[in-house]
Amino acid sequence: MDNTAVFKLSYGLFLAGVKTGTALNACVCNTAMQVTSEPVRLTVTLQKANYTHDLIMEKRSLGLTILKEDCDLDIIARFGMNSGRNMDKFEGIEHTFDLNGNPLVPSAAVAVLSLNVYETKALGTHTMFFCDLVDAETLSADGPITYDLYRKRKNSMTAPKTEKKEEEKKGGDWICSICHYKYDGEIPFEELPDDWKCPVCGRGKEVFVKM
Ligand code: FE
């Protein structure tokens, strides 16, 4: 079986934001999708290890910012590669609050949604949140960013193509099993330092697989 076939699934990219009585936070996710239209219901799936996950479990609602095609990649890095347990991710980031008091980032969005969680399902490492759409606003006629486009934009920034011929490449292609970033740097993958991190998702070398 070719497990990399699932890399061909397309995904959007979103900020899932929440504010409780004591905390304000958001994280990046690629797992929000509409599942029914009458009523409009969505699922959002987050890693249990995420601080945002715990806050949504407590609050039972979230604000979803649907990121736009040309959004600032720094926004994705800030919300996707840090933990709100260690920093205030919203410091210096323009944001608004939805009807539930959850944060949205309209300047980076094509649309914003407000979701109420009515059920959760534990999925091992993740929890799937089943949500009712309770408010929504379209902010731009532009397209939303896809996860694939994000990887391509990020790859073009972080890994300039080398002049090396294919036969000179050593060790094959290494690809991140989390975000599908394909390593194409000058240094052979095996020789990268142990603390090297994937430039897209921030995970270590151990999540890379050889193709
Ligand atoms: Fe990665």
Image: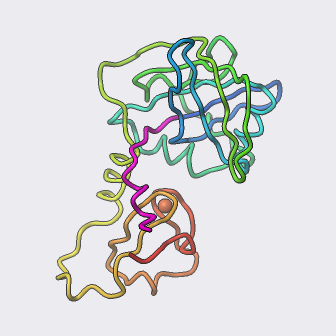
Q: Which residue corresponds to the image point at 55% horizontal and 69% vertical from the top-left? A: 207
Q: Position of residue 44 (x, y in %)?
A: 60, 34
Q: Position of residue 15 (x, y in %)?
A: 54, 34
Q: Which residue corresponds to the image point at 55% horizontal and 41% vertical from the top-left? A: 28
Does residue 66 lie above or below 188 as drawn?
Answer: above
- Label tally: 0
Along the horizontal axis of the image, is 5 left or right of 95? left
Q: Which residue corresponds to the image point at 32% horizontal and 50% vertical from the top-left? A: 153
Q: Determine which quarter of the picture holds residue 119.
A: top right
Q: Position of residue 42 (x, y in %)?
A: 57, 26
Q: Is residue 13 magenta?
A: yes
Q: Which residue corresponds to the image point at 45% horizontal and 85% vertical from the top-left? A: 190
Q: Nearer the viewer, residue 58 or 120?
A: 120
Tell me the quarter of the image containing the N terminus.
Answer: bottom left
Along the horizontal axis of the image, is 87 left or right of 72? right
Tell me the quarter of the image containing the C terminus.
Answer: bottom left
Q: Is residue 123 magenta?
A: no
Along the horizontal axis of the image, is 20 left or right of 150? right
Q: Determine which quarter of the picture holds residue 175.
A: bottom left
- Please, which residue is most extreme toward the front here? 1
Q: Nearer the viewer, residue 199 or 141?
A: 141
Q: Nearer the viewer, residue 129 or 197?
A: 129
Does residue 210 lie above or below 119 as drawn?
Answer: below
Q: Which residues are magenta?
A: 1-14
Does residue 81 lie above or below 67 as drawn?
Answer: below
Q: Position of residue 128 (x, y in %)?
A: 66, 38
> Colour scheme used in the picture?
rainbow
Q: Determine which quarter of the picture holds residue 103.
A: top right
